[in-house]
Every structure is written in C-alpha cells, then in structure tokens.
Amino acid sequence: MLKILLVEDDKTIVTNLTEYLNGAGYIVRSVSGQAAAMSALAAEKADLVLLDVSLAEGNGFSACRAIKAEFDIPVIFLTASGDEYSTVTGFDLGADDYIPKPFRPRELLSRIKNVLRLTGSTGKTVKLGDVVVDTEKGTAMKNNKDLFLSALEYRLLLAFINNRGIVLTRERLLDSMWDVAGTYVNDNTLTVYIKRLREKIEDDPAEPKIIQTVRGIGYKVDA
C-alpha cells in the first residue's frame, strides 16, 4: 500500500487527515518537524510527503529542499498562506503541488492521486487469501472476478488491511466506517456489513478464515 508522511504540527489536522487517508487506502505516518521528517524517511521511505509550510521546528520550505535533495519523492504543500510568493517559492523548491488551508478532503485526495500518477508512483495490490485488493484502483477481486463491494464494505475492508495483525474493537471499526458525508453507522449496521463482507470474500462465511472474530473484543485479519 502507498505510504504518506504527513509533516504537520496541528494535532487536529493530523488526526483528521490520518483517519481520512487511512480510509482511502493509504498508510499514514506523521511527524511535527523537519528533523523528525528526515529521520522518518531515512528509516522508511514514503511514496509522498504532505508538508505544512509553517512548522514549530524548521519550516516547510527548507524541509522540502532537504527531502527533494536526499529522497527525491513527491511533496505537496499544505498551508494557510495563499499568497503568490509562497506558491512560487514552493514550486521553485521542487514542490509537486500546493493546496491552501482550509481544503476539502476529497480535493486533497484527488491532488494526491494526480501527483502520484504524474510522478510515476503506482498503487500496490494486497492479498488476503484469494482476495486481491488494488488500493489505487479501489477494487477487490476474488478468482479474477470483481467482488463489487459497496463503499462502506470497501471502507471496512481497508480498515482491516491497514491494521493487519491488530485486533480491532467494534468501536474502532465504527469510527473507520463513518461516512465522509456524515452518514451515521451504528453497531447493528456494523454487524450487517461484517456479514456482507464475509459473504463476498470468504470461501465459507460460516467458518471465516480472513476476518476472524476475537470473542469479547472484536475482529482481526492476520498479518
């Protein structure tokens, strides 16, 4: 799965963006400053960096210059500065795109996909038994046949993929399924969607091998 490093010191933005991008199929790590960003990329290179211009430690412009020089990966600036100088400076330093705050999450997601496409980064497929999920195309196939997952079924499946090997409580799954448009998903609805998803991806939904029940806690998918 594609990995995004979010360099942002606003905790609210970090929480909201991480949840949204996880739901869209990306693995998100976050750091608050330039030094931490360079260390994180040295430890594990990301496919794209979302970078705030105004940081408590360092600044986005110098961080962009360093990231481009050492790792040569796509950078999208996130900033409250909408003036021409900031925009031009960002592009002169090699930024691949520039989106001012406040921004609509769906617009940011579209910009991310466009930058990854233009820079040659491609989505990766994830296998769960006989199920193959393409997180770039947003598809799930089994035995070369499209499973035709609904939006919430796919969102639920991504929650498991992003947390393989981790037991997810029902409360955490409910949070991950909260629709972008604000549609409320309750506990009974979660039970229905777990059942529907198992019917599509499991060989025997009555004896599930992929989405396993951890009694009294929740569910998990093996790493």
Image: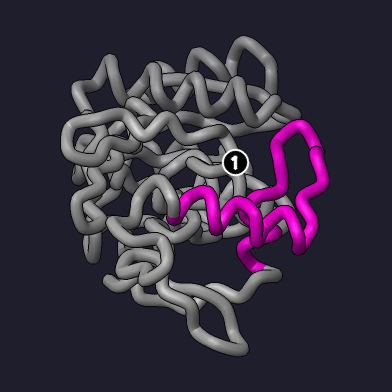
> Where residue 196 appears, x then y in whole percent?
53, 49
Segment colored magenta: 172-198
> Where residue 121 appears, x then y in whole percent?
22, 29
* Total labels drawn: 1
Tell me the residue at 21%/36% (across/down). 72
| Residue 109 counted in the magenta span | no
Give the residue pinned by disc 1.
152
> Where residue 93 appears, x then y in whole percent?
36, 25
Q: Which of the 4 image quarters holds residue 75?
A: top left
Q: Give the position of the C terminus as an image quadrant.
A: bottom left
Q: Which of the 4 image quarters holds residue 217?
A: bottom right
| Residue 186 counted in the magenta span | yes
Q: Does any portion of residue 7 appear in the rendered image? A: no
Tell me the residue at 49%/60% (across/down). 31
Q: Is residue 190 above or below residue 105?
A: below
Q: Is residue 89 above or below residue 48?
A: above
Along the line of sight, which residue is nearer the eye, 11 or 175?
175
Along the line of sight, which residue is nearer the eye, 223 or 6?
223
Tell me the residue at 71%/40% (across/down). 179
Q: What colour scheme has been applied to the protein in the rendered image?
A: one colour
* Left or right: 62 in relation to 168: left
* Left or right: 71 in relation to 140: left
Dot 1: what SS? helix
* Left or right: 196 in relation to 134: right
Q: Is residue 47 above or below residue 206?
A: above
Residue type at tag 1 = Leu
Tell me the residue at 18%/32% (across/down). 144
> Where residue 115 appears, x then y in whole percent?
36, 21
Q: Main secondary structure of the magenta part?
A: helix
Q: Does any portion of residue 163 appear in the rendered image? A: yes
